Image (cartoon, coloured by chain):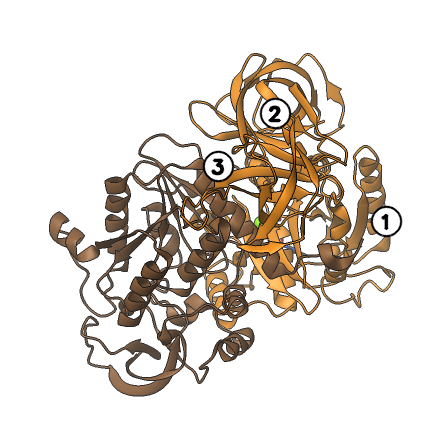
Amino acid sequence: MDLLRFITAGSVDDGKSTLIGRLLFDTKNILADQMEAIEKASKSRNDGEIDLALLTDGLRSEREQGITIDVAYKYFQTPKRKFISIDAPGHIQYTRNMVTGASNADLAIILVDARQGVAEQTRRHSLIASMLGIPHVVVAVNKMDLVDYSEDRFLEIAQSYQELAKKLQIKDLTIVPVSALNGDNVAEASPNMTWYTGETMLSVLEKVNVLSDQNLTDGRFSVQYVVRPQTDEYHDYRGYAGRIQSGTFRKGDRITVYPSELTSSIEKIELGGKEVEEAFASQSVTVLLSSDIDISRGDLIVTSDNAQPILSQDLETLICWMDDRKELKVGSKFNLQHGTSRTRCSVRSIEYRVDINTYEKIEEVEGLKLNDVARVVLRTASPIAYDPYLKNRANGAAILIDETSNVTVGACMVE
Amino acid sequence: MTSKIELDYLDQLEAEAIYIMREVAGQFERPALLFSGGKDSITLVRLAQKAFAPAKIPFTLVHVDTGHNFEEAIKYRDQLVEKIGAKLVVRYVEDTIKAKGLQEPTGKNASRNWLQTFTLLDTIEEFEFDACIGGARRDEEKARAKERIFSFRDEFGQWDPKRQRPELWNLFNGRIHKGENVRVFPISNWTELDVWSYIRRENIALPSIYFAHDRECILRDGRLLNNTPVIQPDANDQIVTRRVRFRTVGDMTCTAAVESDAATLDEVVAEITISRISERGETRIDDQQTEAAMEDRKKGGYF
Ligand SMILES: Nc1nc2c(ncn2[C@@H]2O[C@H](COP(=O)(O)OP(=O)(O)O)[C@@H](O)[C@H]2O)c(=O)[nH]1
Ligand SMILES: [Mg+2]
């Protein structure tokens, strides 16, 4: 069985937490004691209705304020698939938490309140989903019960979303009318919306093909750790431990190491201490080479016969800025973490900022504030071997770390 | 493409956990692995072995002993440490209580579980551990469901749920100042059933208390507790002998047994697959007390 990671996004109160609660409920993944706890907590609140959103709002302040502050992870399964659901906060102020959840998602569900239509957060989260290269986006037009399950209203919203999507890079878009509260088109086709003939939300989640989203050709392997047992039995053993980011590695393959550009070939691949002939994207393995070259943590091993990464100190990046205490400015210095390598970098220029509502480019920007999205040119202290993010998510992503507070302050996608 | 590249979910979870373990070894100078003798930490040890084979695991195993542990778990711990040649540090809550003059909770359902935090923080300070790997899972509890994989703790060991560091892709930021530390949870994304399925697949030996056996128990408020002198008797307690197994193996004062006939891994997996009650709901007494019990403990430095 395979695994799908998806995030729910959209404005506050559009029904993100309720939808996840409903998916868990309808697939019988809420256990008896958890249900009891939700019932108990629901009773102590105003209307006494059972509130499935309480399943994911796990922090005290979230429960008190009835909002989602940080992402919550919930796990469920159906006979077809295992799911990791990531419930994101809707408030602008917590966008960086939404980005945290979205960065690992295969699919994003963007909720829209059928009464409100496309809102600012719908645009912001759609932009983020598109920048992060989330391959599948499902728009859930929610609270259809509050607009009399109107087909016209649905089509109106679907059309305005499609307009918006034209300006973004969304590979695969599906739009589903739902009522998360009542379960219409969540796991079961809605008797109230017989005009809708598409898939239910659950069926979209079960069917979407995630395998084809991976880059399966260009071999990339970032060295995490050098395994050297230094025992009599393994006296000369020198294995490079890491996780294959993309492509396939086989015994005998010629490889090039970056940034040194030294070459060698693969003598042996081990998985959990056992030898295997080949290994592919997302597997954690240990690689042994046929010649003794200098490799350490942070180096990138690449299959020589496929496209090579770009080796450069100048990076054009799209950045989500996440610091609420400091602005990003020209000349700001950071630690840049890319794969397992870390190097210092400084901001050469801010080319433009993206307007969240119109997706227009705003030039002559002084500095970036919390949640700004911008195109920024960075200069690194030592060369980075990267691929353009949209070609290879794993080797085109980097984070900025503040050098004094050590906090992660930026998400970078190298272009 | 052929189907060989499609990884089964257990393989995916394993690959992710091994990646996280290696990040700890690569980013920190003095990492520890918190080992309780329970199934989650036993799984962690197996993952660490796979991550660094054929070398020994590069983590010190740390056990914070409440003095209320199951004998079987302690015996298992010592045998495992011997077998894999790991370094083990044991620190006792009893010693912390004496040294700090802490007030031990008394009365019905009194537990030292919370006091573990003091011992843990002292141990981190004593050995200057900069990272502590733990077996917590997000499916266990609602505050845990919110926590990062690399969870930053300040110099007082505190977790601040409202200011967690962003955690993007699989780029884990382990940069800290001296005195701060990071708690790392490689099996964050595993469910209880995943852990059991993995143990079965890998054929990992477990302490015998995880399998059905006859045991003299205290029946209290519908729960079965091990009949031991460390639990203060209560007038309404009944002593009964039942066929039980443990779903979690923590401190005896706050871990209940479940009635079961499941004596093999296959049978345990089958039973958990159909179980309608969560692991903590069924067996952990410490979380029941208030709705935010775990969140409060974690803010104070608990695992
Ligand atoms: N009528 C109706 N109310 C809904 C629906 N989905 C969610 N709600 C309500 O909208 C409010 C906000 O939902 P919540 O899931 O907390 O929104 P979030 O902020 O996006 O997570 C709650 O009162 C829900 O009960 C729906 O489909 N129909
Ligand atoms: Mg919510």
Q: Picture coordinates of residue A298 (x, y %)?
A: 55, 32
Please tell me whether mark 1 or mark 3 is closer to you in this view: 3
Q: At 61% across and 70% down in the image, what residue appears?
A: A28
Q: Is residue A22 visible?
A: no
| Front of the two marks 3 and 2 | 2
Describe residue B157's horizontal placement relative to residue A106 as left or right: left
Q: Which residue does the numbered mark 3 point to in the structure image? A: B165
Residue A15 x %, y %: 64, 52
Q: Quadrant of residue B284?
A: bottom left
Answer yes or no: disc 3 within 8 Å of ligand 2: no
The amino acid marked with disc number 1 is Leu
Q: Residue B85 versus residue A65: which sits nearer the camera?
A: B85
Q: CA distance from mark 1 to mark 2?
A: 55 Å
**Circle 3 — which element?**
loop
Which residue is at 29% across, 38% downward?
B128
Image coordinates for residue B152, horizontal then vertical, percent: 41, 39
User: Are discs 3 and 2 less than 8 Å apart at CB?
Assistant: no
Q: Quick one: label 1, few (<14), some, or many (20+) residues within 10 Å?
A: some
Q: Which residue is mark 1?
A: A155
What is the letter of the orange chain?
Answer: A
Pointer 1 indicates a residue of which chain? A
What residue is shown with label 2?
A260
Left or right of residue A310, residue B259 in this image = left
Mark 3 chain: B
Marks 3/2: CA distance? 32 Å
Q: CA distance from mark 1 to mark 3?
A: 40 Å
Chain B colour is: brown
For disc 3, the neighbor class at 10 Å (few under 14, some 14 to 19, many from 20) is: many
